[in-house]
């Protein structure tokens, strides 16, 4: 099922300048993404979870090269993405596509569905010959579970779930190898959310896609992902297989996140471990020293304030997986 | 167990003085009886609520569960009496608070209930708070308007409330503006405002939908604490089956402006008696299980200007028979002790002996006819996600 490493991020960093005053002088940096490394294999799904403001969407934009990184390296199939220029870059973009969160604002309201899904073919004219494009768009509509007759309709005529299907059809139009899904189901109702999750899984099987699935909903991420990375304030704090992260998390933040997710089963009331974190996520413009989680962590010591814990393999009871905590130890949370 | 002055802490009594004359009979605070609301728009009449009935007792948490457009927020607005009118009109039914129909009251009398007796927490705290006034001033407004307090006394009360909802440094931050607070802190301020006059009923409309999970846990815990402390009746409006499972006593499931099932929380999750409830429970991924393919409910919720005849859920229901497609729609019938379901086959669904009449294709999608979104209920809310759409608030 999963194959060779196709996407490899090494120490990706993105700092946005904060400008103030009349001269718009830079007075600081928002450290949105601060040293993220991972590998994605062909056909697999890597889930990225974290709270709002942790940099998961910025990471998605970096992987698409919608933003230039402050530093770091991204290789796709052995090719350095950030050093590509012009037509080489354009060719590379075919292989990495994105599905956005909000199906209401990510589709141009003045264009028909046919134009929206067919637009990638105008930018990449050699993908499909001109005469076959309309047919291809209809095939794509069918592939995502919409009727091919809807090709001349406008986005406002569709519901949220159907619009997200249109966004997905646009994403797979150029036969990419990797799709970045940035919160693709979080704007949808529960009953419709399941339809879209199933569609994404279906397409993965049919087309051999690899997904980076960015979401804040840990239940959905567990459902769809093979591996999961947990982000906090711009860095990955833990990454591992789905059962390692959910079954035996070793980082306190992962444990707290898992304990906070309500489980739809009233019989489990008061039986689950409960960690209620105090306070909010600190500002990424001025992240805490040492371990960034130490301000909210119940395990924090002086060492955590000064020494940055590395994301390295640490034992989790059964095997070991990468965790960035000095005092990593497994704890059953769900 | 009626609400008496002794229920409150000594501190509160000093602040609030004697209770107004509302005494619930047998603990029954609120009765909603066959409520009907419609929105008259250019695209036709949208029947947002078609006969909703429920009641709420002291100290109880009733969850109203539904997807966007199911009418759960409109129900809350109608109960509060803050429905935008026009286009919204209450066309039938009664909302009784301690036995008195609030819908028949004068606006002046309603105002005496709204705030001191029934109060509401809105989803999106940023758009519900006024950005140009300090938060303390906005909380204190409750005391100035309803209790006739002066500026300094009311501000002191605001600080006390901000401390109660655990806002760090309340005394210093009472003069801060809403944008200077994080999402979770803003929601705490909304809650402080809602509980300011010690209401008997608190309606929380998606109070945590725009928040992160760790903050959501904090807010739900706070709401639970406040409810126990003040013996409030809490109506929790949400689409999140997880949150409901954690806090609710009873659940009312809404679909297309109707209650389709009401039950005790444990029974509802164990044996849903309506196919829609069953479908919802089957379609959510669970944190504690690595599931197989999700059993999605096919199709879309109906357009409220064109609700299908018969059971409104029949086009999406995998158990639908011919009787489901014709009027009259199945009434909400008592199917077991304290359980009601609006399904012709409720018993069979509950016991699991009914066999599906249609098999969903593997996409779980049976969208044959395009259902354009002609009409959106005001205020528009995003059904999920981290606050991508603003919510209209009237605090």
Image: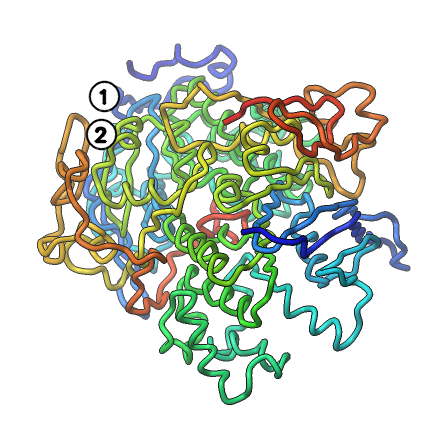
Residue appearing at x 50%, y 57% in the figure:
A204
Tell me, yes or no, whether dots 1 and 2 are on the same chain: yes
Task: State the count of labels.
Answer: 2
Measuring from the top left, give residue A140's x and y in whole percent.
45, 72
Q: Is residue B81 left or right of residue A206?
A: left
The image shows residue A133, relative to residue B184, as above or below, that is below
The crowd level at tag 1 (other Cα within 10 Å; few <14, some 14-19, many 20+) is few
Is residue A185 shown left or right of residue B341? Answer: right
Q: How is the image coloured?
A: rainbow
Question: What residue does disc 2 label?
Answer: B99
For disc 1, the marked residue is: B25
Residue B143 picture location, percent across and down: 52, 30
- Pick the residue in front: B74 or A287: A287
Foreground residue, A31 or B354?
B354
Residue B129 shows in the view: no
What x and y, as percent, mark residue A205? Answer: 47, 57
* Circles 1 and 2: CB atoms closer than 8 Å: yes
Q: Residue furthest bottom?
A: A131
Chain bearing tag 2 is: B
């Amino acid at each position: 099922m999963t194959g060779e490493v196709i996407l490899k991020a090494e120490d990706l960093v993105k700092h946005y300048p904060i400008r103030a005053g009349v001269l718009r002088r830079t007075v600081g940096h928002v450290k949105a993404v601060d040293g993220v490394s991972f590998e994605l294999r062909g056909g697999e799904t890597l889930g990225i979870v974290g709270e709002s403001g942790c940099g998961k969407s910025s990471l998605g934009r970096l992987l698409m090269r919608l933003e230039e990184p402050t530093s770091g390296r991204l290789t796709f199939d052995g090719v350095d993405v950030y050093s590509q220029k012009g037509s080489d870059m354009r060719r590379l973009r075919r292989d990495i596509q994105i599905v956005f969160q909000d199906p209401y604002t990510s589709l141009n309201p003045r264009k028909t569905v046919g134009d929206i899904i067919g637009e990638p073919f105008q930018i990449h004219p050699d993908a499909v010959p001109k005469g076959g494009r309309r047919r291809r768009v209809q095939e794509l509509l069918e592939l995502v579970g919409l009727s091919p007759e809807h090709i001349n309709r406008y986005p406002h005529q569709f519901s949220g779930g159907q619009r997200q299907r249109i966004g997905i059809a646009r994403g797979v139009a150029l036969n990419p190898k990797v799709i970045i899904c940035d919160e693709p189901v979080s704007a949808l109702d529960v009953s419709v959310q399941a339809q879209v999750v199933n569609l994404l899984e279906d397409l993965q099987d049919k087309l051999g896609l690899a997904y980076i699935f960015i979401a804040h909903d840990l239940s959905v991420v567990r459902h769809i992902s093979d591996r999961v990375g947990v982000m906090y304030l711009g860095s990955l704090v833990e990454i591992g297989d789905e059962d390692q992260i959910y079954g035996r998390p070793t980082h306190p933040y992962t444990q707290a996140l898992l304990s906070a997710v309500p489980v739809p089963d009233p019989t489990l009331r008061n039986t689950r471990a409960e960690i209620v974190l105090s306070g909010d996520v600190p500002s990424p413009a001025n992240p805490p020293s040492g371990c960034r989680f130490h301000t909210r962590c119940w395990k924090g010591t002086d060492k955590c304030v000064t020494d940055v814990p590395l994301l390295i393999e640490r034992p989790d009871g059964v095997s070991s997986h990468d965790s960035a905590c000095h005092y990593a130890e497994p704890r059953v949370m769900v | 167990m009626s609400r008496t002055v002794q229920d409150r802490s000594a501190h509160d009594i000093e602040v609030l003085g004697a209770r107004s004359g509302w005494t619930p009979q047998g603990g029954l605070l609120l009765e909603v009886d066959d409520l009907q609301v419609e929105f008259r728009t250019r695209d036709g009449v949208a029947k947002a609520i078609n006969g909703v009935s429920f009641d709420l007792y002291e100290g109880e948490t009733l969850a109203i569960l539904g997807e966007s457009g199911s009418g759960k927020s409109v129900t809350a607005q109608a109960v509060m009496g803050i429905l935008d009118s026009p286009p919204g009109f209450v066309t039938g039914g009664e909302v009784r608070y301690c036995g008195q129909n609030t819908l028949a009251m004068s606006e002046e009398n309603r105002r005496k209930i709204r705030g001191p007796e029934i109060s509401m927490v809105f989803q999106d705290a940023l758009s519900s708070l006024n950005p140009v006034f300090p938060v303390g001033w906005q909380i204190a407004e409750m005391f100035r308007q309803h209790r006739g307090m002066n500026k300094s006394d009311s501000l002191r009360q605001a600080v006390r409330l901000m401390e109660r909802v655990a806002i760090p440094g309340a005394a210093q931050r009472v003069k801060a503006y809403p944008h200077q607070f994080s999402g979770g802190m803003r929601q705490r301020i909304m809650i402080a405002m809602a509980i300011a006059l010690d209401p008997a009923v608190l309606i929380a409309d998606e109070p945590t939908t725009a928040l992160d999970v760790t903050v959501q846990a904090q807010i739900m815990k706070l709401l639970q604490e406040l409810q126990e402390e003040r013996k409030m009746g809490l109506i929790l409006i949400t689409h999140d089956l997880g949150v409901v499972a954690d806090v609710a006593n009873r659940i009312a499931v809404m679909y297309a402006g109707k209650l389709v099932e009401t039950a005790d929380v444990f029974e509802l999750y164990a044996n849903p008696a309506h196919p829609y409830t069953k479908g919802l429970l089957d379609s959510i991924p669970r944190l504690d299980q690595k599931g197989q393919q999700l059993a999605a409910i096919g199709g879309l919720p109906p357009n409220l200007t064109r609700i299908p005849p018969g059971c409104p859920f029949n086009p999406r229901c995998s158990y639908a028979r011919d009787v489901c497609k014709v009027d009259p729609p199945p009434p909400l019938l008592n199917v077991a002790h304290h359980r009601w379901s609006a399904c012709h086959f409720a018993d069979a669904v509950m016991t699991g002996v009914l066999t599906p009449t249609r098999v969903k294709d593997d996409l779980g999608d049976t969208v044959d006819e395009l259902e354009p979104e002609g009409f959106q209920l005001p205020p528009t809310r995003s059904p999920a996600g981290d606050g991508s759409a603003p919510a209209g608030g009237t605090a």
